[in-house]
Image: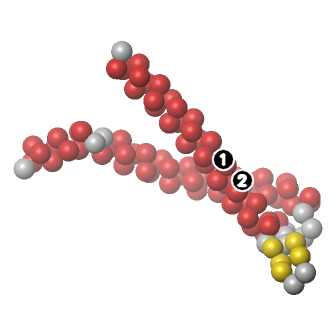
Amino acid sequence: MLKEFAKFLKEFNVFALAVAFIMGTASTTLVNSLVKDILMPIAAPLMSAESWNEATASIGPVKIAYGSFLAEFINFIILAAIIFVIAKKILKIEKEEKK
């Protein structure tokens, strides 16, 4: 049973997955801080409110909180770009190892 478990760990790269999960969590925190503490305060003067997270647009009786959404959208784009670049590098390395 222990040999099967070791084979499972090796076959499915569980350690690499664990490291990727930890790095992903750390990079998410870092990107959140970048967006909320650096990028959004720079963009705040372009918005209609004192603070970027209070920026809203009114369409009749409906208020749309676009400031907070914009921060989350920028956060998503940065994380998606990071994941894309890393995945591309990993796939390139795997192709080279197969040759």
On the image, which quarter does residue 11 sit in? top left
Q: Which residue is mark 1?
A: 78
**61 and 86: which is toward the camera:** 61
Image coordinates of residue 45 in percent, x first then y, are: 92, 60
Q: Is residue 33 above or below residue 67?
A: above
Q: Where, quadrant-wise, is the C terminus in this rendering?
A: top left
Q: Residue at x 75, y 67 (%)?
A: 68
Q: Name the one closer to the observer, 45 or 8.
A: 8
Question: Can see residue 30?
Answer: yes
Percent across and percent down for residue 47 are: 90, 63
The amino acid marked with disc number 1 is: Ile
Amino acid type for the residue under numbered disc 2: Ile
Real-space Cα separation, disc 1 to disc 2, in angstroms? 6 Å
Side of 14 relative to 5 (left or right)? right
Q: Is residue 72 left or right of residue 63?
A: left
In the visual, does 1 lie left or right of 22? left
Asked if the residues shown at circle 1 and circle 2 are in contact, with their CB atoms under 8 angstroms apart, the answer is yes
| Residue visible at 83% across and 80% down in the picture | 62
* Vertical arrangement, residue 42 with respect to residue 48, above or below: above
Q: Secondary structure at mark 2?
A: helix
Relative horizontal placement of residue 62, taking residue 97 as reference (left or right): right
